[in-house]
Image: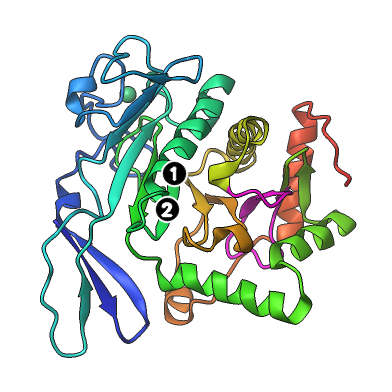
Amino acid sequence: MADLRFDPVFGCWVAIARRRRERPMEFTSSQEVQQQILCPFCRGNEDETPSQVVAFGDDGEVLSGSGGRETWLTRIVPNKYPSLAESPQVAAGGPYASFDTDGTQEIVVPSPRHVSSFSELTCDEAIIAMKACQHRNRQLASNPAIKHVMIFMNCGLDAGASLGHVHLQIMASPFASPYVHRRVKLHEQYNSQHGRPLLRSLLEWEADRQVRVVEQTDHFTVICPYASRHAFQTWILPRHGTRFPELSAAPLAELGLLLRQYVGCLETVLDKPSYNILFHQAPTAEQQEVGWYVELFPRLTRAAGYELGTDVWVNPVAPETAAKRMRSNRQAAGHTGSQGT
Ligand SMILES: [Zn+2]
């Protein structure tokens, strides 16, 4: 069971998730396989997961009922070992507060094949994975009790993964953390001072200079952000204002392909690091105005004493250098897309 506890000293939430320790661990150190476990995400092992929430066929359409054992391409199941789960109200005395969680945590398995990285998905799998994430994002956010939806992926031990089979996770929670609210507040402050959305100003500034821009497509701009907190931090920013749950088919497909391409780019440039994919969305009630983006976070360094004590990150690679190396890699790979506006 998990309970959410509020830290009154630093103003952050902590999930105490005791069942996480029961997870089967496929890794030991680095990317080495610790043990050969029966992979619950491979085709044929569907009984090893809780009953599926929904599955999609290779045409991208929802498969009816619990069917599709032989034909699913993307499958969504509840997380058997959630970090957030239903829990009884935890009594909290003195300066402490806790939260009765009723959030949802689900796993998106984007391929029945035992591949480990988003870059190893086929183009169709990458596109349908985005469609599946959007499908569940919409459904979960329609529940008024859900205040925030976080889509993410952990790949490799250093990124927090416990199983090697590529999978994304969707966590829908009945609260938005102070971290999420801080971004909303910064947006509001900028908007009131300048009369326009912060992310729109940021995109225009970067597009004019082309120093930290890696690529611009019809619907997205890929950049290494000005104040990158870690080496090769990469953002995929939508160029238009549509929220992720309302993206139409073309930009949704483009997002899946960009993720596949840029995970592959970082794996080539950085020799296959562990990485996280993070969908930064605002609270469900506010995201139309605030904007959203997807972050690629290669796990090259660990937070050390200074970072832990001050929350000031030390980044050994300037984002301008990172963007240049990624552009070179993409051009060497034969990319011919527009770099201009
Ligand atoms: Zn597998």
Graded by Cα atoms within 10 Å as few (under 14), some (14 to 19) or many (20 or more), the crowding at tag 1 reads many
Q: Is mark 2 within 8 Å of ligand 1?
A: no
Q: Is residue 179 left or right of residue 211?
A: left
Q: Is residue 81 left or right of residue 247?
A: left
81 is higher (above) or lower (below) than 321? above
Q: Amino acid at mark 2?
A: Val
Image marks 1 and 2: residues in contact by CB distance under 8 Å: yes
Assign ligand 1 to one image quadrant. Answer: top left
Instruction: Please identify the quarter of the rendering in which residue 79 is found.
Output: top left
- Asked if the stretch drawn in magenta spans residue 165, the answer is no
Which residues are the magenta region?
222-243
- Write down the residue under mark 2: 149
Q: How many marks?
A: 2
Task: Give the residue drawn at x 48%, y 67%.
Answer: 180
Task: Give the residue drawn at x 51%, y 50%.
Answer: 279
| Label whose residue precedes the other's in the sequence (1 or 2) | 1
- Percent x, y of residue 6: 28, 76
Instruction: Please identify the quarter of the rendering in which residue 87 is found.
Output: bottom left
- Write down the residue under mark 1: 137
Q: Amino acid at mark 1?
A: Asn
Q: Is residue 170 left or right of residue 24?
A: right
Q: Residue 246's mark?
A: none
- Asked if the stretch drawn in magenta spans residue 229, the answer is yes
As helix, strand or loop, the secondary structure at mark 1 comes to helix
328 is higher (above) or lower (below) than 11? above
315 is higher (above) or lower (below) than 299? below
- Percent x, y of residue 237: 67, 50
Task: Give the residue drawn at x 50%, y 58%.
Answer: 301
245 or 124, which is in the foreground? 245
